[in-house]
Amino acid sequence: MCIRDRGRSGSINFKSEKGPHLAYFGELHPAIIKKLDFKATSEWAETNVENFYGPAKYTKFNSGQSNPTYLIETPQKKYVLRKKPEGILLKSAHAVDREYRVQLALHNSIVPVPRMHAFCADVSVLGTEFYIMEYIEGICFEDPRLDVVAEHSRHSIFKEMSNILA
């Protein structure tokens, strides 16, 4: 969980005990960029995601638990891509297909979830299964204790979290 604020350059930063850090997205290491075929991903998205038009810029989020997560920016809209990590995995591990189905099922409920746009089971596109969903501006907290939030503000955050989970 992290608190984000806009830096002068337009990047998003958060404050922690270790000082300010880039949060949510940062530049990809060149070795990682070579492994991911974003051209094929964009071509797939233009066919399978309604109103997806390139060119698209892909930026890796620093968070996302163990499933690599990317911000996709097109001239018209922002999206989020979640994929399985590379390598040999247990069959039930990193089930992005399950994530996609659960959030898709919850979309018209009272549970706030982003809109799911498309799921890709074809591993030849990006090397693993992945899905693309709506991007929603918000606050990401890396530490569930919310130590980076003023104590008097934590109650309302915990109350809202409890209401959503209930």
Image (cartoon, rainbow, N blue to C red):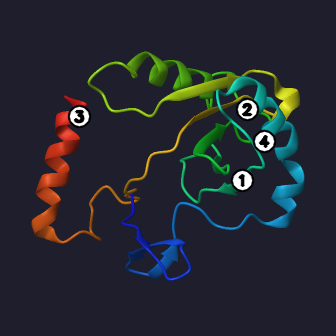
Q: Badge 1: how crowded within 10 Å, few (<14), some, or many (20+)?
A: many
Residue position for label 4: 86
Q: Is residue 129 visible?
A: yes
The residue lying at 44 percent from left, 81 percent from top is 18
Quadrant where the N terminus sits is bottom left
- In the image, is 80 to the left or to the right of 88? left
Residue type indicated by callout 1: Tyr
- In the image, is 25 to the left or to the right of 52? left
The span from disc 3 to disc 2 (Cα, nearest Å) is 32 Å
Residue position for label 1: 58
The span from disc 1 to disc 3 (Cα, nearest Å) is 30 Å
Toward the viewer: 9 or 16? 9
Residue type indicated by callout 3: Ile
The answer to whether mark 3 and mark 4 are in CB contact below 8 A is: no
**Which one is closest to the eye, mark 1 or mark 3?**
1
Residue 134, compared with residue 111, is above or below; it is below
Residue position for label 3: 164
